[in-house]
């Protein structure tokens, strides 16, 4: 925008929109600065108090940015904690669509023949067991008490499930979801090499061998 051009209503609306867009997307900064410079050269130059028109929007945009940053940090911490738990965890809606899962749940769904992730939805090979799981999930999503079930097949490891209502500790999820905790022999425990080395006074090589053996290799 040239300095000689008048900063009209459309330009002002665009500037306000950019202030909030930049709060969510830092890549918008160059365009925002360009529009603020144009605003300063025209409107603010003729009326020094015109800057006050933007103060409220800038303050609110900063609050939004801080809120987003806090949510992202809490989400990263939650994902890290979920991935370290020695059990599989899946959050699903009432149609068994997978909202979030930890790494160990992913291992089970990849390796188990009785239970899988089919295009983003949790599916059981047995239609009867699938209907049972869906009924339990729907009940828990409506606030009913938790329930357990065993997913079994002759040619696949058993998977033990505990289905419960969402405890509202995970940001961004509605109340109409359920949390599924799973245990299975497919989930191998993981041990830190340094911890094994220190606990048993082993060399690093020996500790790696112990870790491999304990993990079932």
Image: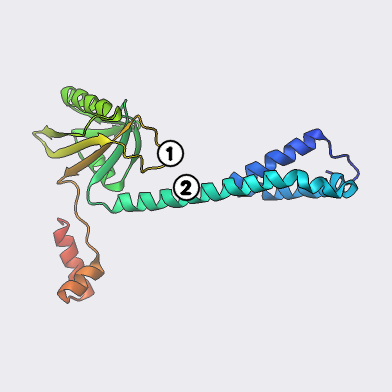
Residue 203 is drawn in which quadrant? bottom left
Q: Where is residue 128 in the image (x, y as percent from the top left)?
A: 16, 22
Q: In the picture shown, does residue 173 fall above or below 208? A: above
Q: For the residue labelled by badge 1, is the local secondary structure a helix, a strand or a loop?
A: loop
The reply, left or right, for residue 4 in relation to residue 126 is: right
The circle on residue 108 is none
Residue 125 is drawn in which quadrant? top left
| Residue carrying label 2 | 71
Query: Residue at (70%, 50%) from the top-left corner?
Result: 30
Residue at mark 2 to residue at mark 1: CA–CA distance = 9 Å
Q: For the residue labelled by badge 2, is the local secondary structure a helix, a strand or a loop?
A: helix
Q: In the picture shown, does residue 147 fall above or below 194? A: above
Query: Residue at (39%, 53%) from the top-left corner?
Result: 77
Mark 2 vs mark 1: which is more N-terminal? 2
Query: Residue at (40%, 36%) from the top-left corner?
Result: 173
Residue contact between numbered discs 2 and 1, judged by CB atoms under 8 Å? yes
Front-most of residues 180 and 202: 180
The reply, left or right, for residue 100 in relation to residue 108 is: right
Other-residue count near label 2 (Cα within 10 Å), few / some / many at <14 / 14–19 / ≥20: some
The reply, left or right, for residue 175 in relation to residue 151 is: right
Front-most of residues 78 and 110: 78
| Residue carrying label 1 | 172
Q: How is the image coloured?
A: rainbow
Query: Residue at (21%, 74%) from the top-left corner?
Result: 198
Quadrant containing the N terminus is top right
């Amino acid at each position: 925008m040239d300095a000689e051009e008048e900063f009209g209503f459309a330009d002002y609306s665009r500037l306000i929109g950019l202030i909030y867009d930049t709060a969510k997307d830092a890549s918008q900064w160059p365009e925002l600065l360009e529009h603020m410079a144009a605003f300063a050269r025209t409107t603010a130059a003729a009326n020094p108090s015109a800057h006050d028109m933007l103060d409220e929007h800038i303050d609110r945009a900063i609050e939004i940015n801080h809120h987003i940053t806090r949510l992202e940090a809490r989400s990263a911490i939650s994902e890290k904690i979920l991935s370290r738990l020695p059990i599989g965890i899946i959050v699903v809606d009432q149609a068994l669509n997978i909202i979030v899962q930890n790494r160990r749940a992913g291992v089970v769904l990849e390796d188990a023949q009785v239970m899988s992730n089919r295009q983003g939805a949790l599916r059981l090979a047995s239609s009867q067991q699938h209907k049972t799981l869906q009924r339990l999930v729907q009940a828990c999503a409506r606030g009913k008490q938790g329930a357990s079930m065993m997913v079994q097949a002759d040619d696949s490891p058993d998977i033990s499930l505990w289905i419960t209502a969402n405890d509202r500790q995970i940001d961004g999820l509605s109340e109409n979801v359920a949390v599924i905790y799973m245990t299975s022999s497919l989930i191998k425990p993981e041990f830190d090499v340094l911890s094994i080395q220190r606990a048993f006074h082993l060399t690093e090589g020996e500790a790696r061998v112990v870790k491999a053996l304990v993990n079932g290799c």
